[in-house]
Image (cartoon, rainbow, N blue to C red):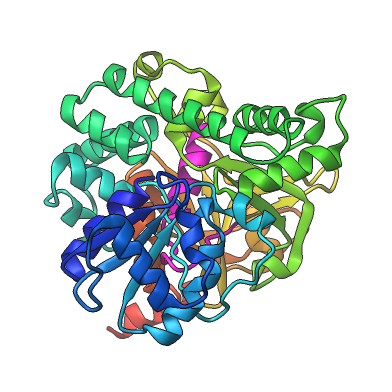
Amino acid sequence: MGKTWLVEATARECVGDVVTLDLERHARARELFADPSPRKILAAIEALLGKRVEAGKCVLFLDEIQAAPEALSRLRYFHEELPQLHVAAAGSLLDFALAEHASSMPVGRIEYLYVEPLGFAEFVGALEGEVILDVLRDWRPGEPIAGPVHERLLGLCREYALVGGMPAVVDRYRSSRSLVDAAPVQQNLLTTLRDDFAKYGTRAAQPRLLKVLDSVARQAGRKFMFVQVDREQRSAVLREALDCLCRARICHRVYGTHGNGLPFAAEVDERNFKVLMLDTGLLLAAQGLLWQENWRASDLMLVNEGALAEHLTGQMLRALAPSFVDSALYYWTRQQRGAEAEVDYLIANGTEVVPVEVKSGKAGTLRSLHRFVAEKGARLAVRVSSEPPQLADVKTAVPGFEPRTFRLLSIPFYLIGELPRVLAGLGAAPREAKRRRRQH
């Protein structure tokens, strides 16, 4: 994910300098944290590295801290006794180590920041610069986007889906603009993730982790079924493996919820969930799909019957959360025979529940979206597709329910990152909005 680069670059920009202690590279560095005194620890670090750690002038960066979980406990004393010293820590598959760590965590003394793959805007900024992003930032519902600009942004979105947001892959692609050149970097990242499993858990658990990860790629876009992973293994054992992958943030569950109100987690059905990989590019690599073959497809989002489009939307929705929030996604499903329905995602707009339906092609009905609006009384809904943006007042047509008017915001994939801003201005019910327009 580029955690080391991110911390060091931010430290130099915001504070001035950084002193990095790699706890994995220095095999005996964890012994430095045996003493609870932060001043003695600091003196030992300076002696080991041959560098001064000056409070207010640099950041002390404890990298690969999973190699010395004791160091996490000592952060409490750094906070209390040396509050003027900036301290940052990062770790690979850190949650695996924390699950095995018996020492208490310094509650209230640590701020957590969650790193996601590069978002679409960051990806475009790296490739094209900031100018084209002004179109997204300035867009308002009801305004058209010029056809050539729409096609250009949609093309960049397809590139983003293929390349993904892993920094090393994006960097290689930026230098050559060749998917063939970037593919080995992507495959190496996936291989490295799999090899990292050897560091954690028992030997018996490692094959299960690999099986579950492979099955996540195969079951993309569908309710996750443990029986599809391995019919010979108990679901409880496979669930534990999936829990490990989610703790390590390699995978993310999307839980089914009833969608009656906020918080979504209050109505979660823990047996009903889908699973996303952390990055669309890694998903395609895990599926064994050749980039150059996908690139020739007339509509990339149709790959795997639209599973890629749904996955891409989920990845972009996760990136909307502030960095201090461990983002969670939810969807709605109705299993009643003869009235089955499923809405891909539910998001919050203030206190309102907003259904989000993803359409991979240019055509398709919104039957499930209409049913959700009719049953739950939603005033606002979102359709994501490859089509140009549009805002319309729509009436539901669901048997057994009175027609209900709601606002349907249709946006192309490249505008997902603007949803919080756009939805905040569309909170009014359609009838109230019409009344204001007449008064104006």
Tell me if residue 300 comes above or below residue 350 in the rendering: above
Total residue callouts: 0
> Percent from the top left, x then y, of residue 311?
51, 40
> Percent from the top left, x then y, of residue 414?
33, 46
Residue closest to the eye, 367 or 219: 219
Quadrant position of residue 9: bottom left
Tell me if residue 292 comes above or below residue 177 in the rendering: above
Instruction: Check if residue 313 falls in the magenta segment.
Output: yes
Q: Quadrant of the C terminus?
A: bottom left
Say which residue appears at 29% left-offset and 64% top-offset: 46
Say which residue appears at 30% left-offset and 24% top-offset: 182
Q: Quadrant of the N terminus?
A: top left
Q: Is residue 7 visible?
A: no
Residue closest to the eye, 306 or 244: 244
Region in magenta: 308-329
Say which residue appears at 48% left-offset and 18% top-offset: 289
Tell me if residue 211 comes above or below residue 120 in the rendering: above
Instruction: Check if residue 15 falls in the magenta segment.
Output: no
- Say whether residue 111 is left or right of residue 395: left
Q: Is residue 301 visible?
A: yes
Say which residue appears at 18% left-offset and 64% top-offset: 17
Residue closest to the eye, 215 or 349: 215
Quadrant position of residue 402: bottom right
Residue closest to the eye, 324 or 334: 324
> Percent from the top left, x then y, of residue 368?
65, 48
Tell me if residue 351 comes above or below residue 286 in the rendering: below
> Percent from the top left, x then y, of residue 211?
69, 27
